[in-house]
Image (cartoon, grey):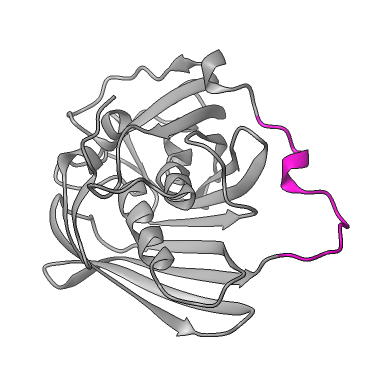
Amino acid sequence: MSVTPVFEGSNGRFVATEFGRGPWDPRALHGGAPAALLVRAFEGLPGPEGLALARVTYEFLRPVPVGPLEVRADVVRPGRRVRLLEASVLADGVEVVRATALQVQMADAGGAGAGSEAVPPPPGPEQGRPAEIPVPHRPMFAFDAVEVVFVAGHWGGGPSTAWFRLRGPIVAGETPSALQRLAAAGDFGNGISATLSWYEYLYINPDLTLYVERAPVGEWICLESQTRISPGGIGLAESVLYDRRGRVGQATQALLIAPR
């Protein structure tokens, strides 16, 4: 298994490696790479105990280049029960990704209600098959930094279910956290459930929103995804997120759909 990091560096200054590249441009990263890096930045902000990351919304403002990057993060609204966080990735001083995160106090419902683990996960990755698709360049985030295993559907065949596992670290010398693994996988929904050929169409997501019902456990994250394209409207990809125990959250992506 590869241990090549997606990013090298620390203290807000990083270099993105080719193992973070996306499918559209060999000079630009897959959205899952900066998504995980910004979750790492949120996790590094000091704060009160007992708060959990509930939502992260990303705006992919410009392509994120392979090469030097800067990461900034701050608390926008402090609080003991609710906090709003903000972070950015910059390249040459220009903001290329912006993210906001909502932290809330962990739920205490006195045992009432059904937990997310009551929703069983899809069949595990050992029951699936490795993703197979001609890729435009190597290395890239999928499949060199992330292992992809389908248990339903196939790449470009509409609604699909696939498991994702990081092959190495997000940042050199570090073990990815559970939420970093979730963020890295969460941006794949439009890819695995696409109904259009990437040789003929763009279906790029300029945003991503992750809702986290609980922190996942283990290395594998599953996406149960579908894409809908409304004539005269927009494209939208929705994914339910699982670990091996059950449901952990959901992801939504608005899509730019256009002929190449």
Residue 179 screen position, x and y as percent? 48, 52
How many numbered circles does the render carry?
0
Q: Residue at x 20, y 28 (%)?
A: 136
Task: Please determine whether, in this image, residue 53 is positioned above or below residue 84.
Answer: above
Residue 195 visible within the image? no
Residue 159's quadrant in the figure? top right
Residue 38 screen position, x and y as percent? 36, 61
Residue 226's quadrant in the figure? top right
Task: Please determine whether, in this image, residue 78 is positioned above or below residue 216.
Answer: below
Residue nearest the viewer, comparing 238 with 11: 11
Q: Residue at x 19, y 42 (%)?
A: 25
Residue 204 screen position, x and y as percent? 36, 46
Task: Please determine whether, in this image, residue 139 is positioned above or below residue 22.
Answer: above
Tell me the quadrant of the picture where the C terminus can be found.
top left
Is 139 a magenta residue?
no
Q: Characterize the magenta stretch by its predominant secondary structure.
A: loop
Residue 45 visible within the image? yes
Q: Residue at x 31, y 69 (%)?
A: 88
The answer to whether residue 235 is left or right of residue 18 is right
User: Magenta region: which residues?
Assistant: 107-121
